[in-house]
């Protein structure tokens, strides 16, 4: 191994062009695996962090569902539920009835329309971005940048849906959850003062608006499922990929990091197609460049004596640090890596759309049914059904492993198991107290 001074002296005596070969420091297999997975030198994968946030939203929502059972919860558990409601975007956490006296139906209608109003500022920002950035572009760059802005707007909408959809579903189901109050009288589970009868005007208004909201919700969620299916099919096989479609961007936030998600296809479209088409080239400058290129090919390059003298001068090269050498080695490996299509697709449609299909819809819908239908005098049975839902979820996590990151799979599995054990202890305590 040559010393640094010897290398600098040898370089100063040489004339360029010169080929330099540096040996990068040896790395362990774990470091090489981290680099192949797209992690930084510290082993941090930001995709895993973002996916963990999305998963934690679903876990916090399930945690608030556990508190819906009428058990004697400890004070610490109640405080944790309040914090979970705040971070899971449960708008009921603000308790508007404490600041202003208003009928319950007004509060319910306000909670019902808030998710739709949340889309309005995002849409306004999207329109302003179109008006500010697109005028003056050529036709191809105009269409490309418009599609990219539309996809960015769709990803923002997807994030809003992930945050507010569970609470919106809870709000819609309130008029449909009636329990028996005795003597053949049925009341709403959340509002015992409202009777489930055609003679009650409040109930009829809530039922009519709730039916309309359920129709809109069902149509919208069916369309999201269709987008998930189209997005999964788009990235598989030999399809035309001149642009990332709107239905792919609409579910992008929920599908990244899942088994079945192909980041390479999206990166190839963005780098090789969208980046080129979004660059607006003037027709006059392009024609001038083509003419100069033809002239250079016919006449040859001009000899510049001063440029030749500059090449002969001695030069000093700056020292490459450890990060630069690691980046060069990583880029070389990426350049030489074979880009072949996998013989077998990783995951399936269920693992690809796991966040929307299972975490957001199936688990929340079954949990709401277990809580609302057993909130009168069948609390233990409802908690048992909820435990069965958690057990089924854990079984699916262990068998399907829907996330590419094993850390995310293990984290969600452990947290759902903890929720199962919390309900188990609460049910056992309730049964023991009833038999005393």
Image (cartoon, rainbow, N blue to C red):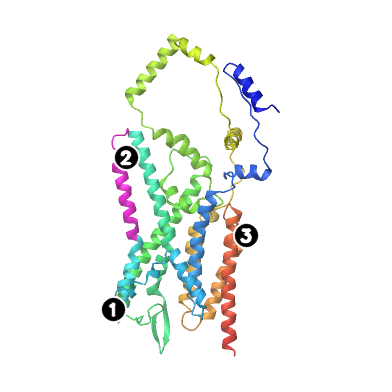
Tell me, yes or no, whether the highlighted magenta stretch contains residue 130.
Answer: yes
Mark 2 neighbour class, 10 Å CA radius: few under 14, some 14 to 19, many 20 or more: few
**Sequence-wise, which precedes: disc 3 or disc 2?**
2
**At x 59% / y 49%, what residue is drawn?**
346
| Residue 240: image location, x then y, percent | 47, 39
Inspect the magenta stretch and tell me whether residue 358 lies in it.
no
Q: On the rendered image, what quadrant is the C terminus found in? A: bottom right
> x%, y% of residue 170?
42, 69
253 or 143, which lies in front?
253
Magenta region: 116-138
- Gap between marks 1 and 2 measured at Cα: 51 Å
**Mark on residue 209?**
none
Q: Residue 201 carries which label?
A: 1
Closer to viewer: mark 3 or mark 2: 2
What secondary structure is marked by label 2? helix
Q: Residue 399 carries which label?
A: 3
Cα separation, mark 3 vs mark 2, equals 48 Å
The quarter of the picture where residue 174 lies is bottom left
């Amino acid at each position: 191994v040559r010393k640094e001074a010897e290398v600098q002296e040898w370089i100063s005596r040489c004339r360029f062009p010169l080929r330099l070969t540096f040996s990068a420091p040896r790395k362990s297999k774990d470091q090489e695996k981290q680099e192949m997975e797209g992690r930084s030198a510290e082993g941090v994968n930001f995709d895993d962090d973002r996916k963990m946030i999305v998963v934690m939203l679903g876990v916090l929502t399930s945690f608030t569902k556990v508190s819906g059972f009428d058990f004697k919860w400890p004070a610490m558990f109640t405080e944790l539920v309040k914090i979970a409601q705040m971070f899971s975007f449960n708008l009921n956490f603000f308790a508007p009835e404490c600041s202003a006296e208003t009928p319950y139906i007004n509060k319910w209608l306000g909670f019902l329309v808030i998710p739709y109003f949340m889309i309005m500022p995002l849409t306004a920002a999207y329109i302003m971005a179109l008006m500010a950035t697109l005028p003056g572009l050529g036709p191809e760059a105009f269409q490309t940048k418009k599609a990219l802005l539309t996809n960015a707007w769709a990803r923002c909408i997807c994030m809003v849906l992930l945050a507010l959809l569970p609470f919106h579903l809870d709000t819609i189901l309130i008029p449909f959850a009636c329990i028996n109050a005795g003597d053949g009288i049925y009341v709403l589970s959340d509002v015992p003062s409202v009777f489930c009868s055609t003679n009650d005007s409040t109930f009829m208004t809530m039922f009519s608006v709730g039916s309309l909201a359920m129709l809109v919700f069902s149509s919208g969620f069916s369309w999201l499922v269709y987008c998930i299916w189209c997005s999964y099919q788009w990235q598989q096989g030999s399809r035309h990929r001149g642009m990332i479609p709107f239905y792919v961007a609409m579910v992008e936030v929920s599908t990244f990091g899942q088994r079945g998600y192909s980041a390479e296809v999206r990166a190839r479209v963005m780098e090789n197609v969208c980046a080129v088409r979004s660059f607006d080239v003037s027709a006059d400058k392009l024609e001038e460049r083509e003419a100069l290129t033809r002239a250079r090919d016919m006449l040859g390059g001009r000899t510049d004596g001063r440029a030749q003298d500059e090449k002969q001068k001695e030069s000093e090269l700056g020292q490459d640090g450890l990060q630069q050498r690691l980046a060069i080695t990583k880029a070389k490996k990426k350049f030489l890596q074979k880009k072949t299509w996998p013989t077998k697709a990783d995951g399936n449609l269920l693992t690809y759309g796991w966040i929307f299909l299972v975490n957001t819809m199936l688990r929340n819908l079954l949990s709401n049914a277990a809580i609302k239908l057993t909130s009168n005098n069948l609390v233990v049975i409802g908690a048992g059904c909820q435990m069965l839902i958690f057990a089924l979820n854990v079984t699916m996590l262990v068998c399907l492993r829907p996330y590419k990151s094993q850390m995310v799979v293990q984290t969600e599995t452990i947290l759902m198991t903890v929720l199962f054990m919390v309900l188990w202890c609460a049910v056992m305590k309730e049964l023991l107290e009833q038999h005393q």
